[in-house]
Amino acid sequence: MSAMLRSEAKYSIGQVVRHRKFPFRGVVFDIDAVFANTDEWWDNIPEDTRPRKDQPFYHLLAENENSYYVAYVSEQNLLADETGEPVDHPEVSAMFGILNNGVYQMEAPLH
């Protein structure tokens, strides 16, 4: 992650966030400085709710009431999760250590 991205991204790797409009939350495990997904993914978002591409996008280990999945969400659609509750996604424990003040600590360096 570049120094520029660190200074511009609102959320950090390991932070627990929730979606502004939809009922899911997750842990940030990667950050793109700007949109870096496929045109097909982009085109599937309804035009009236499509986020700007020139902002950070976050890869999340996400969960809702029914399932666990990986989500790709624009910064404008995220809020910090203030519950202090852990995220139960099964991959969280493989990537991160303990949850401390809403942020999971990195368990080991990624290779």
Image (cartoon, grey):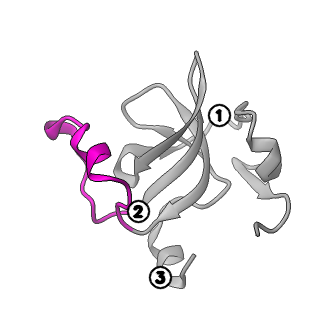
Q: Amino acid at mark 2?
A: Pro
Q: Are marks 1 and 3 in contact (CB under 8 Å)?
A: no
Residue 48's x, y, as percent? Answer: 14, 38
Residue extent of the magenta highlight: 34-56
Q: CA distance from mark 1 to mark 3?
A: 29 Å
Q: Quadrant of the C terminus?
A: bottom right
Residue 41's x, y, as percent? Answer: 32, 44
Give the mark nearest the N terminus, 1 or 3.
3
Q: In the rendered image, which residue does mark 1 sit on? A: 83
Q: Amino acid at mark 1?
A: Thr
Quadrant of res 20: top left
Q: Residue at x 21, y 43 (%)?
A: 43
Q: Quadrant of the N terminus?
A: bottom right
- Looking at the image, is 88 positioned above or below residue 28? above
Q: Is residue 22 visible?
A: yes
Does residue 35 show up magenta in the picture? yes
Q: Nearer the viewer, residue 46 or 8?
A: 46
Q: Which numbered marker is on residue 2? A: none
Q: Residue at x 85, y 58 (%)?
A: 107
Is residue 20 left or right of 64 when viewed as pictured? left
Q: In the rendered image, which residue does mark 2 sit on? A: 56
